[in-house]
Amino acid sequence: MSLLTVMPSGKTIEVAEGTSLLAALLGAEIAIPHKCEGQAKCGSCHIFVQEGRKGLSKVAREENEKLDSIVGVGSKSRLACQAKVLGTENIKIELLGFGSGL
Ligand code: FES
């Protein structure tokens, strides 16, 4: 179990090991775009991981390729549908908001 803090609201939720950030957010009724339903194809679930990066699953090839095609990606970028909580560290993420055109 890890604690997930979601900025900018600051809401904190408990997330079980193996759960994707997208599933955790949707399960807590926190809105996040997810146009391809977690297939690493749309990039709409792009978020920034502010803390606890090591507490998430590694970036796989599909995620890396999709991130490469998104404008505004930085070293903290992940796709929420691909990043799974490992349960080893608490995590803080930043939602990037809607209307970014993705
Ligand atoms: S929901 Fe489409 S890339 Fe994550």
Image (cartoon, rainbow, N blue to C red):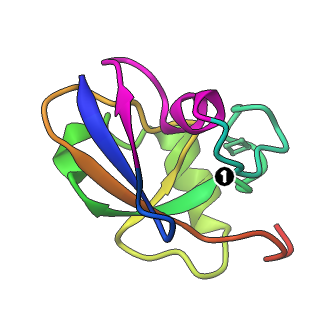
- Residue 47 appears at what percent x and percent y? 53, 61
Is the C terminus in the top left, top right, bottom left or bottom right quadrant?
bottom right
According to the picture, the residue beneath numbered tag 1 turns out to be 45
Determine whether the residue tagged by mark 1 lies in a helix, strand or loop. Answer: loop
- Compared with residue 94, is residue 72 higher up or lower down, i.e. above or below? below
On whether ligand 1 comes within 8 Å of the CB at mark 1, the answer is yes
The residue lying toward the viewer, choosing from 41 and 95, is: 95
Q: Quadrant of ligand 1?
A: top right
Was residue 2 drawn as part of the magenta stretch in this picture?
Answer: no
Q: Residue at x 58, y 53 (%)?
A: 65
- Mark 1, Cα crowd under 10 Å, few <14 / some 14-19 / many 20+, is many
Give the position of the N terminus as an image quadrant: top left
Residue at 57 percent of width and 39 percent of height = 25
Residue 76, x across and y down, in percent: 36, 68
**Where's residue 14, x and y in %?**
35, 30
Magenta span covers which residues? 12-28
Q: Position of residue 33 (x, y in %)?
A: 76, 51
Q: Residue at x 66, y 52 (%)?
A: 45
What kind of residue is marked 1? Cys
Q: Tell which of 9 and 102 is nearer to you.
A: 9
Q: Is residue 80 above or below residue 51?
A: above
Q: Residue furthest bottom?
A: 72
